[in-house]
Amino acid sequence: MEERLQKLIAQAGIASRRAAEEMIKDGEVLVNGNVAVLGTKADPEKDHIKVRGKLINARLEKYEKVYLLLNKPTGYITSKADPEGRQLVTELVGKYRDKVHPVGRLDVNSEGLLLLTNDGQFTQAVAHAAGKVAKVYHVKVKGQPSERQIRQIARGVELDGVKTARAEINPIELSETNAWFEVTLYEGRNQQIRKMFKSIGHSVLKLKRVAIGFLKIERLATGEVRALTDAEVKRFFKMKESAPAKPLPRRVPNLAEKRPARKGPPPARARKTKV
């Protein structure tokens, strides 16, 4: 990810940003052998950055901030370590394995979008924006809940002594033996969707998160990861300070108003992305 040179020099612990600007003005900073100017940006993964004749890339590896979006498969633990030796989501992010931590979680039997970073401020920004960011899931449940039951859990149900916030639940596909729903939440309690459906006597068979706010699953195939863009990272920081999200509509659609039937959620087309 490209950053302004004065920021990279400061991250490497060489000088403050103001002092780094003076170094750039004095022609003491080179990028790929060329003298840099104020405003020049560089990517430490691709560009050779020298300050007063010394390469600083190795020093930047320690301070590099990483922001990743992973399409988590089932069977992986959302953690950096596991005493039982189970597979970890960090095993899927290549060279960043020992650098990043998950932001939020998906349980071992769930799949879909998951953020990972090594930036504590970003983690806090996402946490503070939690009530403003819609998280969208495709959920397959056993049996066919009634319209009354769906309305009940959409309006809020008591779990572990605390009532859930209102959710939006729309039917995707219904059959004699099971049903697919699109569930939108603005909170993220432990195994919330599974517990919501369990409270009305219908167990969750499959659960996939397909969106985190403006981030969509799109063509990111299962197990693939990509870096967030600068604009996407900044957008999360802005959400921290923005107004709360608009309340979800009170109406719960009639189950007869379902979308055209299909088998399961929309498939994600594979696109190889290197990080």
Image (spheres, grey):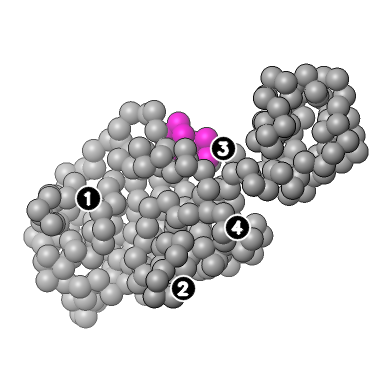
Which of the two discs, 2 and 4, labels the residue nearer the N terminus?
A: 2
In the visual, does 258 lie left or right of 122? left
Q: Is residue 39 magenta?
A: no
Q: Secondary structure at mark 2?
A: loop
> Mark 3 packing: few (<14 Cα in 10 Å), some, or many (20+)?
few
Image point (55%, 66%), residue name: 92
State the image coordinates of residue 242 (x, y, percent, origin top left): 37, 29
Q: The magenta stretch spans which residues?
A: 233-239
Kindly tell me whether residue 145 is visible in this rendering: no
* Residue sitting nearer the eye, 213 or 143: 213
Q: What residue is pinned by disc 3?
A: 231
Q: Quadrant of the N terminus?
A: top right
Residue 96's disc number? 4
Q: What residue is pinned by disc 2?
A: 87
Image point (74%, 47%), residue name: 58
Q: Quadrant of the C terminus?
A: bottom right
**Mark 3 to mark 4 CA distance (whole Å):** 21 Å
The reply to whether discs 4 and 1 touch (Cβ–Cβ < 8 Å) is no
Q: Secondary structure at mark 1?
A: loop
Which of the two discs, 3 and 2, labels the residue nearer the N terminus?
A: 2
State the image coordinates of residue 258 (x, y, percent, origin top left): 26, 62
